[in-house]
Image (tube, rainbow, N blue to C red):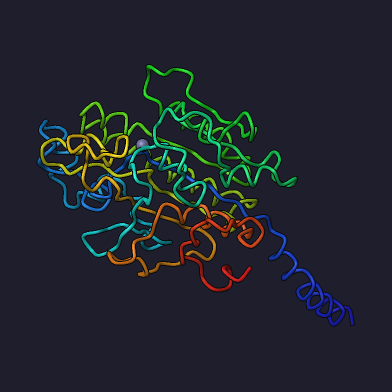
Amino acid sequence: MIGKLLAACAVLFGVLSAPAAAQTAPRNVVLVTIDGYRWEELFRGADPTLVTEPAARARYVDVPDRAQALTPFLLSFAQTGVLIGDRDHGSCARVTNDFWFSYPGYAEMLEGHPNPHIRANHAGPNPEVTVLERLIRRPEFADQVRVYAEWNVVPDILNVERSHIPVFNPPDESAPHDPQVIARAREVFAQLPRVTWIALGDTDNRAHERNYEAYLAAAMAADDFLRALWDAIEADPRTAGHTTLIVTADHGRGASAGGRWSGHGSGRWRGLIVPGLRHVGSDAVFIAARGPGVVATNAYDMDHCATSAQVAATLLESLGLLNEERQPDMAAPLTIFAPTVASQ
Ligand SMILES: [Zn+2]
């Protein structure tokens, strides 16, 4: 009798609680950006023509698999989630803004469309509203949006005076930025908010200094951080299985030849294109994601590139809030979710 009663209770409990738990478990998202990290290094590894020093060649070039030697965790998204942008194999992602530098890139990915007001990195506080600001306006997200950024323009991109999004910037501008951001971001691993943007960028800082080996080292450090972040997410029952991690870059860089790799930008200036400022190919980016329901796709080939603008709606969909927060001018979410998740 007691056995039957327990069995009945178990059935009843199962029927009542399992779907309810699935519907109410809060979903989280973490966006990590690696400023100006090229798809070339991500998928091909270090460019042997740019690495000269013997110790660096031993570390990055004379290895069995150059890409694996650099960012193995990010590459694993191809198996555990989705990884778009390997143009050598016909997978394509790009920005759709006209400029191919940082503020326009972040504005595009966080608003879901190119922002016509942002034509320079010193454009000042963003007149448009990012998806992070739309989320923090919701009562249940009031203290659940946090940003850790190496770049001191990020408060403008998010218009923090208006949005009140808390942004951590590195206190010491003269020291490498990413280690400072990573140290602070690690402090919240145990209490991850629902929405986190971690903006790394020593890749871009070292590239502009034409220090290719330091650029590679910054990419490796970013990859180590991503692995530690994911391990922490998976170890915490509050976030494990409920958290989507999206990783992308705000722009690419120019080709290796002629030192063009160190810079980026379309060369657009006051309605003209200045050839000397144009870094062909720096509109190319990668987009990676993993988490509940994220599956690989081959939808984005060279004729149908994924775009940075699609990140905003993808972020909303990963929270189950696409229908509520999507804007008419937002690009469609990436088709990376299995149907059960996409239907919510
Ligand atoms: Zn940038």
Point out the image quarter for the N terminus.
Answer: bottom right
Point 56% across, 39% down: residue: 189
Point 28% across, 34% down: residue: 217
Rendered image quadrant of residue 328: bottom right
Q: Residue furthest front?
A: 271
Residue 224 or residue 332, whichever sits in front = 332
Across and down, in percent, residue 132 comes to: 59, 44
Rendered image quadrant of residue 315: bottom right
Q: Residue furthest right?
A: 1
Ligand 1, by image quadrant, is top left
Residue 338 or residue 324, whichever sits in front = 324
Residue 287 or residue 270, whichever sits in front = 270
Point 43% across, 44% down: residue: 226
User: On the rendered structure, is 278 left or right of 14?
Assistant: left
Across and down, in percent, residue 248 comes to: 40, 48
Query: Where 280 sits versus 7, above or below?
Result: above
Across and down, in percent, residue 284 comes to: 29, 50
Rendered image quadrant of residue 130: top right
Query: Tag count in the figure?
Result: 0
Point 25% across, 42% down: residue: 253
Point out the image quarter for the C terminus.
Answer: bottom right
Across and down, in percent, residue 311 comes to: 47, 53
Query: Where 235 sits versus 265, above or below?
Result: below
User: On the rendered structure, is 342 left or right of 199?
Assistant: right
Query: Where 180 sits versus 8, above or below?
Result: above
Residue 187 or residue 119, whichever sits in front = 119
